[in-house]
Image (tube, rainbow, N blue to C red):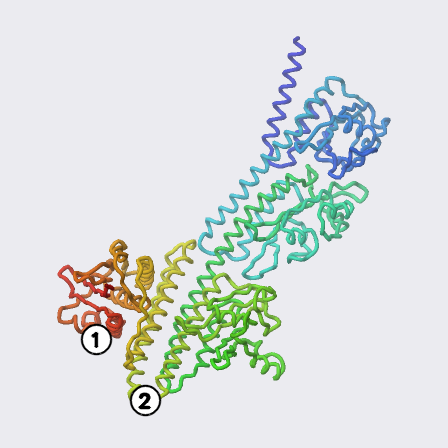
Amino acid sequence: MAQTSTSQRHHDSILKALVSTALNQSKLSGLCEILKVVASAVNATGCVLWKVSPDSKLDQDPPIGSLFVVAHWCEKNQIFTTFDVPIIPLIGVAILKNQTINVKDAMSEGLESFARSGNVRSLCLVPMNFADATKGIIGMFRDVPQPFDKAAVLEAEQLAQLVGHLHQVIRREVAFRLMQNVDHAVRETERRCSTASLPKDDLKKVPQRICDLVTETLQCVETSIFLEDRFDTPGVYELMATTWPERLKKETYRKGENGLTGYVLNHARPIQIFDLSQDINTIQFRHPGLIWKDSTIVAEAARRFLGIGAGDNLPPLSFIATPILQGEELLGVIRCSLAKGPPYYLGSEETSLLELVAAHISEYWGAVLRRRKSEEENLAWRALIDSIRKLNRFVHNQLAKEVPDEHEIFAQALQVTDDVIRGAEITDIRLLDQNKKELYFAETHGVAWNTGSKGEIQERLRRRFSVLENPPKSVGADVYKTRTTCVIPDVHDTSYHYSETFPDTKRIIVAPIGVEDKFFGVLDIRGTGEHGFAPHTEAIADVLGQQLGLYHYLMATISQLRSSEAEREIEMDHQRQTFEDLEHQLKSPIIQAYARVQAFLKDIPAESRVLRQMQAIRGLCGKVRRVTISTGIFASLAKGKPIEPTFRSLYYQDLIRMLIEAAMDHEFIVDTERYIKFEVIRKTFEPLGKLEVRADPDLLEQAVNNVLDNAGKYSFPSTSVLIYGGFTGKGRFHISVANKGIKIHSREVRQCSERGWRGEEAAAASGDGTGIGLWIVDNVMKSQGGELIIAPTTSDGITEIKLILPVSS
């Protein structure tokens, strides 16, 4: 009984040591320490753990396959070099019959190779199972012919059943620590560069740290990370980090290339190869479509790096790789190869671990790309606004000439397009020939237009595109008809109506050129390089198309004003006043929007900049739209022509949406340091549903915006502009705007709606304004049977302006 108790305590202490050892490991090679405990428990001088290779077929007769060394421990620190062991009779019995084999003398039992490779005399082979249900053997050996007794064999069999589970414990502990370290590396970098991109060399530090961590954890020779820098080298997966001891012969990849890494990029799924030295047909059976033939080079490198002689067996030349994905988007690939220590292979669990690492790399690189995208987008919008400001000045100077040159205006606009849009190598403006209903090239930009013979150049410029054909035979004709910008990422996509002008073109954006409901042509932006157009390019193309439409419209308007020689003297005065008004209307919003961008970039965190910037740009475009309408109204009134409204019923939802958008636009355009808010009081418009009010929505919107523009200019800082509605005492419908700011005295009320008049206090408070805003509003309201009512400023400093509309009986 005492002997049994002592034996049990000895066994318990071994189990405790075994579990404690497993929990204290930080590398997969910690499995060797487990084997050391097992060997010590049975007084063995060494211990080897074998696993049945993946391609073995044990159910055949005779069985086919082999075992490879997973890990080993030897008292004399010698390396067990027999990595590949065939299923010979004794080993076959242990594996197939799940039976322990106790060999007194390996030399006399047909195991000479064991004896020679590891100085083995006595040997005990105990079958076991790994966590993935693969069969294996623990071999305990002594360097003297002293067989293991029954107690040692029993102890060995009990411990062998735990080794597979403890191996799994080590894997999970190591995986957890690795992911903690990888996560720390990523988070630390995110804290250091949350608002700005790092230089390329600094960006590589995180991937290199991850490579080092993975290599140390998996005990492999190589971990390499390839990532796509879509802003500098799109389509190229560049080596960002590696632990390969020598310089890699191939440091960049593209989709469509052969090889192991190319296979992962092409299929966007992991690859796991147990041994690169095995038959290529076997590898291709598991990975259809794989083309690879460098096994000899890999084997030579393995011997060199692992220090294994030409006559000794190599461990499995394992290779694993997994794509780095963000959703379905491929960012790159991470790969590992050549295990240099126990366990001597990279299997499915290592592949799964690598996928987790790839997810962290995806998070890191995705954040890098998002920051780059935001910076690129903000720079593009800043450049656009600055360029439009300069372009407006250029257009104003052209319009002031006796004979304006529209080609010069178009040429400057295309230069702006080239400067602002990355990858815009070939651009042009096509206008509509009203007689033939064909688009023709009015202006071109880019060296490609002048390539080829003289005849080829002329033939290219003479091309015409009918807008009457259905379906259209060119994307330009399609855009002209639909009035919608079209982005074609790949011109070879047959779903588009693309008509080739340049064979090198890879992508194109076509934007309509127009203003309001008038369209004059299209703007073509072609790309021939590897860089695709950034997502914000479509919006920029829209803005450029609107600007070109505005310029063309102004040119046409000026031309009409100058067309009649008989009216020349009368029209000259109108033109001078028009130029003065246009200067204010074109120049002021751009300067304000530009200042808004500058303040925006300085004060707002990166994650919210793009949204608010786009809202500010919308405010700018809204201003341009209002300028266009005002220009048309002004021109009509200047010629003595009446405004001709198009009446429609005024519905609550449409009116509220218009008022809220107008309020938001004006809030963005007003100088941010004045802190002026615009608020629509919705409930005051609810009675609109009880009676029918008919008006021209476009003209009404113009009138509201002109009133809000004045309110924004002349309100005191840190105040609110209120917009409300309802019915007057006489039963008429009103839209009212109230603000607290510069006074309007009783004696000035009548003068407010006169063209060119500005109050003294208003002129002193703001240099902006020419006194035409309320004059236009007054005419707009009268044309609809309505009225503009301006109330003198109250004792509380509140100024109220009402837009009155009649109610249908």
Name the side, left or right, on which 766 lies relative to 39. left
Q: Quadrant of residue 28?
A: top right
Disc 2 packing (10 Å; few <14; some 14–19; many ≥20): some
- Image coordinates of residue 379 in percent, x first then y, are 45, 64
- Image coordinates of residue 518 in percent, x first then y, are 41, 73
In the depicted view, which residue is nearer to us: 185 or 323?
323
User: Is residue 574 positioned above or below 389 on the image?
Assistant: below
| Residue type at numbered disc 1 | Glu
Residue farthest to the top, as pictured = 1
The residue tagged 1 is 754
Residue farthest to the front, as pictured = 809
In the depicted view, which residue is nearer to us: 361 or 266?
266
The answer, for residue 221, to whether it is visible in the render is no
User: Contact, CB < 8 Å: mark 2 with mark 1?
Assistant: no
Please give the label number shown on residue 568.
2
Disc 1 packing (10 Å; few <14; some 14–19; many ≥20): some
User: Is residue 807 positioned above or below 576 on the image?
Assistant: above
* Between discs 2 and 1, the one toward the N terminus: 2
| Residue type at numbered disc 2 | Arg
In the depicted view, which residue is nearer to us: 809 or 631?
809
The answer, for residue 239, to whether it is visible in the render is yes
Q: What kind of element bears circle 1?
A: loop
- Rendered residue at 43%/53% (across/down): 607
- Rendered residue at 46%/60% (across/down): 375
- Rendered residue at 14%/62% (across/down): 794
User: Is residue 109 positioned above or below 349 on the image?
Assistant: above
Q: What kind of element bears circle 2?
A: helix
- Image coordinates of residue 320 in percent, x first then y, are 66, 45
User: Is residue 207 positioned above or below 528 on the image?
Assistant: above
Q: In 3D space, how far apart are the residues under numbered discs 2 and 1 (Cα atoms)? A: 25 Å
In the depicted view, which residue is nearer to us: 377 or 552?
552
